[in-house]
Image (cartoon, helix red, strand yellow):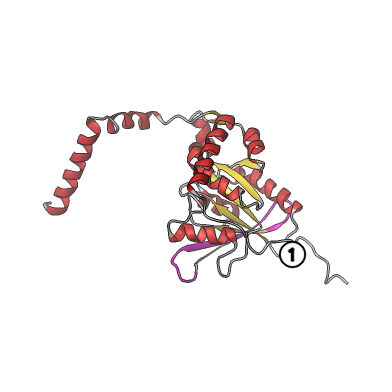
Amino acid sequence: MTAGVLTVENIRPARIALVGPPNSGKTTLFNTLTGSRQKTANYPGVTVERKSGLLKTPVGHPVEVLDLPGSYSLRARSPDEAITRDVVLGRQAQETLPDAVVCVTDATNLGQHLRLLLELRALGRPLILALNMMDLAQKRGCQISIEALSRQLGIPVVTTVAMRKSGVQDLLGQLDALLAQQPTGERAATADGWVEPSPDAIRAYHAEVERLLRDAVVREATPERFTRQLDRVLLHPAAGPLILLALLFLMFQAVFSW
């Protein structure tokens, strides 16, 4: 009699939420992980897109991946950010609390993206940090100590190159390790106890980000040569405002005269 046997094939898929700031490569990572097995819809009552897809890890764990809207913080300031916050906290109607969260960050812009990670870590839920665009960061001379960052944060840290299938293998391996430690039947319903960070808490987050960057970033990314040359002109204290005024004049002429 085998009806009651629980196997990798017949358990309910674990739910993994991809969370990250806009333009961090989160959706590209989602597409690489799930391939063509995607479903797209809108959340009830709001025109915010919901993407979900299925995958199997190398060990064979079934996983439902949820691609959440881009967000810089759990302090929601837009409908998109509110959806992300509510899903992560288990407050969104018709969405169960994710079993784990993968925080996707742009490795070339780590200082701007780590605050969201610290807010997610404070929830006490299973969490993985995915440093995306590592190939681009390395081309720009950025060196990040993955071991130091993982040790300081107390969570797994992996590097990803979302545009390549081979660039997500470390993440899949960490998902297997996480799911092996957390049986899918043992899940919390909500992440109770969260309150919006106070100004003092936000300042503390920023101080923590600075400390993490000092300890883990061996060498910061340098802008590309063309970008540096462009900044030198557009940000010049005299030439910059003149260029801005010229562009505004051209736009005005294009709209009202031409």
The residue closer to the viewer here, 76 or 27, is 76
Lateral position of residue 167 relative to residue 230, left or right:
right
The residue closer to the viewer here, 98 or 59, is 98
Image location (x, y in percent) of residue 243: 22, 36
Lateral position of residue 258 relative to residue 48, left or right:
left
Query: Magenta segment, which residues?
Result: 44-62
Which residue in the rendered view is the most extreme toward the left? 257
Answer with the quarter of the image where residue 34 lies.
bottom right
Reply yes or no: does residue 244 show up in magenta.
no
Residue under the point 13% across and 53% down: 256
Q: In this view, does 61 lie above or below 103?
A: below
The residue closer to the viewer here, 192 or 64, is 192
Residue 105 appears in view: yes
Residue 36 appears in view: no
Image location (x, y in percent) of residue 200: 50, 44
Q: In this view, does 21 lie above or below 217?
A: below
Image location (x, y in percent) of residue 153: 63, 40
Question: Pointer 1: residues within 10 angstroms few (<14), some, or many (20+)?
Answer: few
Reply yes or no: does residue 48 show up in magenta.
yes
Under tag 1, what secondary structure?
A: loop
Number of marks present in the image shown:
1
Residue under the point 31% across and 28% down: 232
Lateral position of residue 174 relative to residue 105, left or right:
right
Which residue in the rendered view is the most extreme toward the right? 1
- Residue matched to label 1: 11
| Viewport quadrant of the N terminus | bottom right
Amino acid type of the residue tagged 1 in the rendering: Ile
Residue under the point 22% across and 36% down: 241
Q: Is residue 230 above or below residue 28?
A: above
